[in-house]
Amino acid sequence: MGRSRYTITEPDKPHFMTCTVVEWLPVFTRPDTVEILLDCWRYQRENEGLKLYGYVILENHLHFIAQAKNLNKCVSSFKSFTARKIIDYLKLQKAEMLLTRLRFAKQAHKQDREYQFWQEGVHAELIFSETMMREKLDYIHANPVKRGYVNLPEHWRYSSASNYAGQVGLMEIDVW
């Protein structure tokens, strides 16, 4: 798969983004791997000026809406850091089947490392209106419902839907 045709055009404005694990491998079925993602976003919010407006993490991909002064750099460091941490975790867990697939997947794109975790690029769309922001947040939060995992968006643990429903989520977000 080639590089994404989507680009972060105005990094200081919110963007809807999708990141997908290579081969759609189900890595985020383990709470420890999800926590790596959440910890990285927490760090970026506290130290890099990331504003995270919404997110959902499914078993093999995630959607989120964010903005930052240098959003390209935030997304790049998010993907790099989380890939490294998750691969280290999978090695510790001796998850050989997943590691074998990640090793095979890198052959198409990466010569400088043993594994590839994320698909190349990031699907990024500029949020250009209040209406579009609401549509993208609704889309993100409805994802687990559409898949039949839960009946209500706020019941999905790995989502910001509970934050928007006035409940405590797994992490603070920048509610729109």
Image (tube, grey):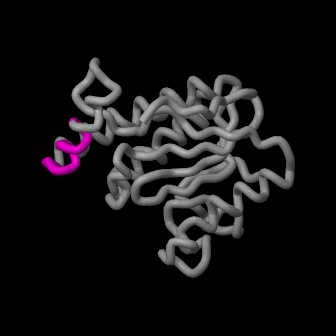
Indicate the quadrant containing the N terminus: top left, top right, bottom left or bottom right: top left
Q: Position of residue 11 (x, y in %)?
A: 71, 28
Q: On the rendered structure, is 138 left or right of 156?
A: right
In the picture shown, does residue 88 fall above or below 166? above
Give percent across and percent down for residue 52.
65, 44
Residue 84 spot, x, y in % from top left: 32, 33
Image quadrant in which you'd find residue 71? top right
Q: Is residue 160 above or below residue 68?
A: below
Closer to us: 172 or 75? 75
Residue 20: image location, x then y, percent: 45, 46
Magenta stretch in the rendered image: 94-103
The residue under the point 40% across, 37% down is: 82
Q: Magenta span has 15? A: no
Give the total of numbered labels.
Answer: 0
User: Magenta span has 95?
Assistant: yes
- Please state if 158 lies on the left or on the right of 1 as rendered: right
Task: Tell me which residue sits at (66%, 30%) in the image.
Answer: 8
